Image (spheres, helix red, strand yellow):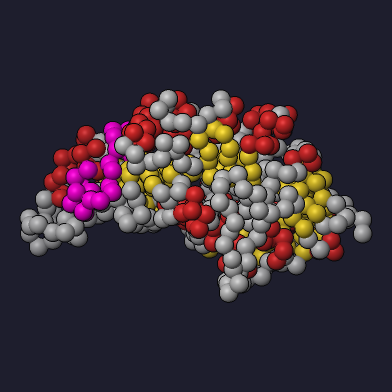
Amino acid sequence: MSLPFMSAEEAAKFIKHDYNVAFSGFTPAGSPKEVPTALAKLAQAEHDAGKPFKIGMFTGASTGDSLDGALARAHAIKFRTPYQSNNDLKNLINKGEVDYYDMHLSQLAQEMRYNFLGEVDIAIIEAADVNEKGEIVLTSSVGISPTAARLAKKIIIELNENHPAAIKGLHDIYEMQDPPIRRAVPVYTVKDLIGSPVIKVEPSKIIAVVKTNRKDEVKAFTPVDAVTARIGENVANFLANEIKMGRIPAEFLPVQSGVGNIANAVLGSLGANKDIPNFMMYTEVVQDAVIELMEQERLTFVSGCSLTVTPEVLDKIYKNLNFFKPRMILRPQEISNNPEVVRRLGLITINTALEADIFGNINSTQVLGTTMMNGIGGSGDFTRNSFLSMFVCPSVAKNGAISAIVPMVSHMDHSEHSVKVLVTEYGVADLRGKSPNQRAQAIIENCVHPEYKQLLWDYTRLCGKKLHTPHTLSAALAMHCEFLKSGDMRNTQWTVCGK
């Protein structure tokens, strides 16, 4: 069969109200752009005519503004999973206008296969190449694309000429079996290849191919500043000492790092620390700092799910594929984030906390326990199963009006049982082998901003007696309540119910 080339507007007409649509991409990397933009215009036209038009959305993670943003502004989203970062979509979620399912990223593909979330009517996949045999070469990410393409009743391809067909071989496409016949994932080293360089689908499922030439909508992260630089140095110095003490092998271990400016600072500090040997990464997102370390030959190999790099850096990679292709691989997120593989490889995992409490519980997702920030992403996949789990964050936010460390987190994504180390710009709290009282002492002493130290020490003594976990429930969220009342947690006055 010949490929059915057509315009984005023609392709969008295949999508009907109440369809469930799966999209390629993991972050803006590899996300479709032309068809979602056309779909948003179609939805708006339907609304203007007094007709309903909303779709359910499965994606790998966050996407670009041409997808999440355009469809959110057109009020065309019925539900959305598993992770997002677009402000327009976030506002609709927090107003209750879009149902949002926050999920561990490693679980989405399998839960789609289990039919826990409904059928996939159409998958929209960005490709660098596609042929009449139904072989699809992905672009700058993998995400849920293999499962989405297999499950979907029909497939629309965005053939993006901004990504060269020569990237074939950058992807390792492997879809897990489902219980009761699931077998081990045969990834035993970071470099292991276990699948195919292409997605293979029944050619008759491809109902449209839309040509485009648009760059990924990846924006540069905030530059490293004094606070994030100190956090990075604290992480690097701690890990260097762990090697010295023999608790981490001398050859080091693979690293997983979250996304953003703190992650960039941490990676930069790891590269600059001469006591840390050259290393590899097994992670989700490959960002600019990773490419810099690779060019410095401090990073010898990276396995990820997406190339979430700025357009300039992606152009550099594509112009130097002979250098970069042998040093990186992109996998589906159920493999890049697979708990079995994470535990087997012995990853050092470094993720960012929105909020931590004095016992090491972590809130990654919800401001004041009610307002969704972005989602849990893959942090849970890695944290629970790592060799050494670390969380990092600045000690305060909003010019000191918010302490990132509180008596009790307002929402818990990672419990104290999974968190081994907490790091801020003030220092490191090693929580291994410590009781709740000992953890509180380590965190307050080493990580809390000086303006909040005494306040939190006073909280630990508030109950007036020795407890296994020194909580006073009537005051545990008083710092949050004070912020809602006065706009500054430093004004907190401890009171105990009934006294």
Task: Work out which residue is located at the far bottom of the displayed protein and give it.
Answer: 180
Q: How many marks?
A: 0
Taking depth in this image into account, of 482 and 214 the one nearest to the observer is 214
In the image, residue 83 lies in the stretch drawn in magenta: no
The residue located at (43%, 34%) in the rendering is 266
Note whether residue 236 is visible: yes
Name the side, left or right, on which 83 lies relative to 355.
Answer: right
Vertical order, 114 against 42 (above or below): below
Vertical relation: 117 (above or below) 273: below
Query: Residue 178 versus residue 487: which sits nearer the camera?
Result: 178
Above or below, 120 relative to 384: below
Residue depicted at x 39% and y 47%: 389
The residue under the point 44% across, 38% down is 252
Magenta stretch in the rendered image: 423-442
**Residue, x 77% and y 58% (percent of image)?**
200
From the image, which quarter does the N terminus lie in? bottom right
Where does residue 261 sit, x and y in percent of width and height? 47, 34
Q: Indicate yes or no whether the magenta region holds residue 430.
A: yes
| Quadrant where the image shows the C terminus | bottom left
* Res 466 → quadrant: bottom left
Residue 312 horizontal side relative to residue 224, left or right: right
Say whether residue 289 is visible: no
**x%, y% of residue 371?**
42, 54
| Left or right of 15 on screen, residue 487 | left
Whole-percent x and y of residue 171?
69, 47
Q: Is residue 440 left or right of residue 123?
A: left
Query: Of residues 272 and 28, which is closer to you in this image?
Result: 272
In the displayed structure, 262 sits above or below 100; it is above
Q: Position of residue 230 (x, y in %)?
A: 36, 29
Name the residue nearer the viewer: 159 or 292.
292
